[in-house]
Image: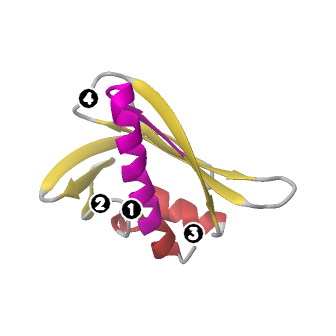
Amino acid sequence: MIKYSIEYPLKSSIKVLYNNLSTASGLGEWFADDVSLKGKNFVFTWDGFPQEAEVVSKKSNGHVRFSWVDEEDGTYFEFKIVVDAITNDVSLFVTDFADSEDEVEDAKMLWNKQIDRLKASIGS
C-alpha cells in the first residue's frame, strides 16, 4: 500500500468545512451519491454499491479519519483542516492509500474531482 496526501487550499469557515467532512448530510453533498448512518458507522453509496466505514479518530474542527469496515489492512482516509497561523488561510489535507505506485495518480485525480464538488458545495 502506498500512503499519499494532497493539500487543497479552500475559502471556507472551519466550522462549515468540518460539518461537510464529518456528518452524513455534509458528506452526502459532495463525497458520495448517498451517505447514511448505520449505528456509529457511515455507509457511503456510489452507483448503488454501499461501502461502510467507521470513524476511528476525530477532533472537532480539526480532522476526521475513516477506516473501511471490510478492509483489515490498516489503511484509512483522513480529512485534516489546517489554518495558517499568519495568514489564516484554510487548507484541507486528504490522506489516503493506493494499492500501488501506478494507482496513486488516478486516485489523486479522483480526489481532485471530489474536492471540486466539495468546493461547489461550500461555495469556495
Identity of the residue drawn at 21% across and 56% down: 45
| Residue sticking out furthest to the bottom | 123
Q: Find out whether the residues at labels 4 and 1 contact each other: C-beta distance under 8 Å.
A: no
Residue linked to disc 2: 32
Q: Which residue is mark 1?
A: 27
Looking at this view, is 75 or 4 the one in front?
Answer: 4
Residue behind mark 3: 16
The disc at residue 79 is none
Q: Which residue is mark 4?
A: 71
Q: Give me the C-alpha separation between circle 2 and circle 1.
A: 7 Å
Image x and y of residue 85, in percent? 83, 53
Say above or below: 28 vs 123.
above
Location of the C terminus (image quadrant): bottom right
SS for callout 2:
loop
Given the image, on which type of amino acid does mark 1 rest? Answer: Leu
Extreme left residue here? Answer: 48
Residue type (three-letter) at the residue carrying disc 3: Val
> How many marks on residues?
4
- Upstream in sequence: badge 3 or badge 4: 3
Label located before the other in sequence (4 or 1):
1
For the N terminus, the quadrant is: top left
Q: Disc 3 to disc 4, how far (Cα)?
A: 30 Å
Query: Residue 44: x percent and y percent?
Result: 26, 54
Q: Could you tell me which secondary element the residue under label 4 belongs to?
A: loop
Dot 3: few (<14), some (14–19), or many (≥20) neighbours within 10 Å?
few
Q: Are the residues flagged by discs 2 and 1 in contact, CB closer than 8 Å?
A: yes
Q: CA distance from mark 4 to mark 2?
A: 19 Å
Closer to the chain start, of discs 3 and 1, is 3
Neighbor class of circle 4 (other Cα within 10 Å; few <14, some 14-19, many 20+) is: few
Q: Main secondary structure of the magenta part?
A: helix
Q: As shown in the figure, which amino acid type bears the numbered disc 2?
A: Ala
